[in-house]
């Protein structure tokens, strides 16, 4: 499958067309973006790590019955994924209090929650991805009531699969975001998990860690653990499955 023109350039990924309109190439760059893209730096081989990391997670979820847009890895930095029509909301699950939840509610970071907390956010960088509820999504036409419930169910299902997977590698799945949509060639078909699952969109500290910043924030703040968020997660991937991965 031939690589075509650039379709979209995000904070850390670039999407390219192919000669099949139903498939696109997702290219992972070494860019590290934080604070809604206000700061950008470079981390050597981060793109390779995220590419393999995402492939591992997507394949694991597919094997457990969660349908995704993932096709296959093409090379160290690129994967083939289905062309998607994405919904305008992000689904966030929190297993441990950190980040914005801690700031909003005055709860100490690192507080383990008795059960996962689910949140919706409107995807809009200019507005800093505000938190919204089911009524916002339904009334403003971002998704149907049925889709809202399906996103909740699928996101919790993902948590039930991944939380014990990371725990087995001594990693806390603190929180993460998921995005859903439908295949462009099947607009009335089932919701598919799209975008990516990488350390860019979740917090994955070692279970013994005391800091809960996500990797981009950690890098931008120049802490001694500059690559901890990426390397601690990727270094443990072989412990979560038989596939071997490159690690930074």
Image (tube, rainbow, N blue to C red):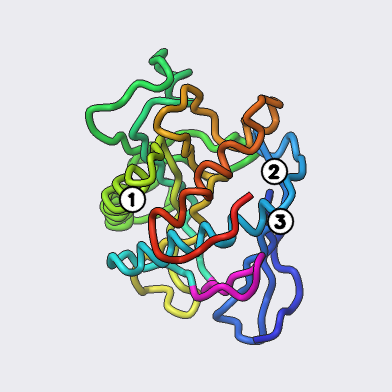
Quadrant where the N terminus sits is bottom right
Mark on residue 248? Answer: none
Residue at 65% in and 67% down: 76
Q: Which residue is mark 3?
A: 29
Q: Position of residue 209 (x, y in %)?
A: 46, 27
Q: Secondary structure at mark 3?
A: loop
Q: Earlier in the sequence, mark 1 or mark 3?
A: 3
Q: Secondary structure at mark 1?
A: helix
The crowding category of the residue bearing disc 1, from other C-alpha atoms within 10 Å (few below 14, some 14 to 19, many at least 20), is many
Residue at 36% in and 74% down: 189
Instruction: Check contact, mark 2 vs mark 3: CB within 8 A.
Output: no
Q: Quadrant of residue 64?
A: bottom left
Distance of label 1 from label 3 (alpha carbons):
26 Å
Q: Residue 127 colored magenta? A: no
Q: Position of residue 57 (x, y in %)?
A: 43, 59
Up-down: is 121 above or below 150?
above
Give the residues drawn in magenta, as a range: 71-83
Q: Position of residue 80 (x, y in %)?
A: 57, 74
Image side of residue 185 versus residue 66, left or right: right
Up-down: is 144 above or below 3?
above
Q: Nearer the viewer, residue 59 or 16?
A: 59
Image side of residue 234 versus residue 41, left or right: left
Q: Earlier in the sequence, mark 2 or mark 1?
A: 2
Residue at 54% in and 38% down: 129
The crowding category of the residue bearing disc 2, from other C-alpha atoms within 10 Å (few below 14, some 14 to 19, many at least 20), is many
Q: Which residue is mark 2?
A: 32
Q: Position of residue 109 (x, y in %)?
A: 43, 20
Image side of residue 121 versus residue 34, left or right: left
Comparing labels 1 and 3, the label whose residue is closer to the camera: 1
Q: Which residue is mark 1?
A: 165
Comparing labels 2 and 1, the label whose residue is closer to the camera: 1
């Amino acid at each position: 499958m031939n690589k075509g023109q650039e379709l979209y350039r995000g904070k850390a990924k670039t999407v390219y067309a192919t000669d099949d309109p139903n498939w696109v190439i997702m290219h992972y760059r070494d860019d590290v973006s934080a604070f809604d893209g206000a700061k950008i730096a470079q981390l050597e081989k981060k793109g390779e790590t995220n590419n393999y990391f995402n492939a591992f997670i997507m394949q694991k979820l597919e094997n457990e019955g969660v349908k995704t847009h993932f096709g296959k890895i093409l090379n160290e930095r690129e994967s083939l994924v289905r062309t998607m029509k994405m919904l305008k909301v992000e689904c966030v699950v929190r297993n441990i209090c950190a980040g914005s939840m801690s700031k909003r509610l005055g709860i100490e970071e690192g507080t383990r929650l008795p059960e996962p907390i689910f949140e919706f956010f409107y995807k809009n960088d200019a507005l800093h991805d505000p938190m919204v509820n089911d009524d916002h999504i339904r009334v403003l036409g971002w998704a149907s009531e049925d889709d809202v419930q399906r996103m909740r169910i699928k996101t919790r299902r993902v948590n039930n699969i991944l939380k014990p997977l990371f725990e087995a590698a001594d990693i806390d799945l603190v929180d993460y975001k998921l995005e859903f949509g439908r295949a462009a060639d099947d607009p009335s078909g089932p919701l598919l998990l799209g975008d990516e699952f990488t350390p860019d969109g979740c917090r994955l500290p070692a279970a013994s860690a005391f800091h809960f910043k996500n990797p981009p924030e950690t890098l931008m703040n120049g802490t001694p653990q500059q690559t901890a968020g990426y390397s601690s997660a990727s270094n443990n991937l072989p412990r979560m499955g038989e596939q071997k991965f490159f690690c930074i």
